[in-house]
Image (cartoon, rainbow, N blue to C red):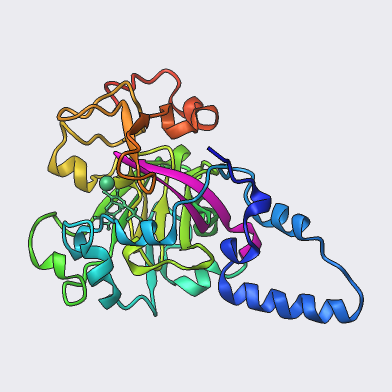
Amino acid sequence: MRRQSPADLQWSDVTPKSFFLNRRALIAGAAGMAIAVPAAAKLDYVTSPLSTDEKPNSLEDITSYNNFYEFGTGKGDPSAYAPALTTDPWSVKVDGLVGRPGSYDLADLLSGIPLEERIYRFRCVEAWAMVVPWIGLPLGKMLEKFGVQPGAKYVAFETLVRPDEMRGQKSPILDWPYREGLRLDEAMHPLTILATGLYGEDLPNQNGAPLRLVVPWKYGFKSIKSIVRITLSDSQPETTWNMLQPSEYGFYANVNPEVDHPRWSQATERHIGAGLFAGREPTRMFNGYADQVAGLYSGQDLARDF
Ligand SMILES: Nc1nc2c(c(=O)[nH]1)N[C@H]1C(S)=C(S)[C@@H](COP(=O)(O)O)O[C@H]1N2
Ligand SMILES: [Mo]
């Protein structure tokens, strides 16, 4: 299998379109003054060193096979029904153990964080695996804006509740709002990002517009979409899947081939886009990010803290 190197990526693949267009205008202007910008240098500059070198899945795969129960339980429901969601304006309520609680406009929250610091290409896995070229920013960077108080040990997140636009919320399939949480050290890890886009565009609604979490070493359900509330707390928050089925879904949900889901093995995963007959590949410890994150769990029994 051919591996794609960062140099194969187009600038437009990893950059929000508006920024791309401005940048082109800028380069055109600069060319008039005979200043050349080497293409490779630009890419090194924008692609996070934490990115995988695996080939990203197609935009089609990423946007047509989704889980987003607010729009229904079928994999095709989010792409069919999420376009109904209004994502602008969008505000995020920040509360709990923070120095600056309040209701923040998303645009204000993102201002001051340069776009060129926001490019990540992560492998994400949940029985199936995809590689997504995200645009995002470290969650820790955002939390620092709020002023995390010394007593804070966990971060909790909630998704929007708006049944008029989220047709799945008209039935009690889950206890709305969708909730997730991380331990503070997990939240502050540089691999944990808040994504605002993918493939150089704003996030498609079905992928969690306008703001969703991405925690690449954990199973997909931790990566909560369309976030409207972030709460810092001193105790472990309740999380949607754990509340629903605690024997099957733990708080940590670290990708781990050695700890099976009670109803299925998690030793292998199916790669979306690899073709119907491609078979399965071995699941990697912490989804391949063990070097970076195993230290967060030293001394913890991962079979008990699953
Ligand atoms: N609010 C909300 N967030 C959610 C979900 C959901 O149903 N509602 N599903 C989760 C699950 S189970 C998965 S696998 C991922 C899927 O993300 P993707 O559709 O971008 O691949 O989103 C997670 N975030
Ligand atoms: Mo999932």
Residue 152 x/y as whole percent = 42, 44
Given residues 191 and 271, the one toward you in this image is: 271
Q: Residue furthest right?
A: 34
Residue 242 x/y as whole percent = 20, 40
Indicate the quadrant where residue 50 lies: top right
Q: In which quarter of the image is the C terminus?
A: top left
Residue at 37% in and 31% down: 281
Can the viewer see residue 280 in this picture?
yes
Left or right for 52, reference 225: right
- Considering only vertical position in the picture, is 116 above or below 4? below
Given residues 279 and 91, the one toward you in this image is: 279
Residue at 28% in and 23% down: 259
Q: Residue furthest left?
A: 171
- Considering only vertical position in the picture, is 92 above or below 153? below
Given residues 201 and 149, the one toward you in this image is: 201
Q: Residue furthest front?
A: 277
- Considering only vertical position in the picture, is 51 above or below 142? above
Left or right for 141, reference 304: right
Whether 117 is among the magenta residues is: yes
Whether 10 is among the magenta residues is: no
Region in magenta = 113-135
Residue at 35% in and 46% down: 272
Residue at 71% in and 76% down: 24
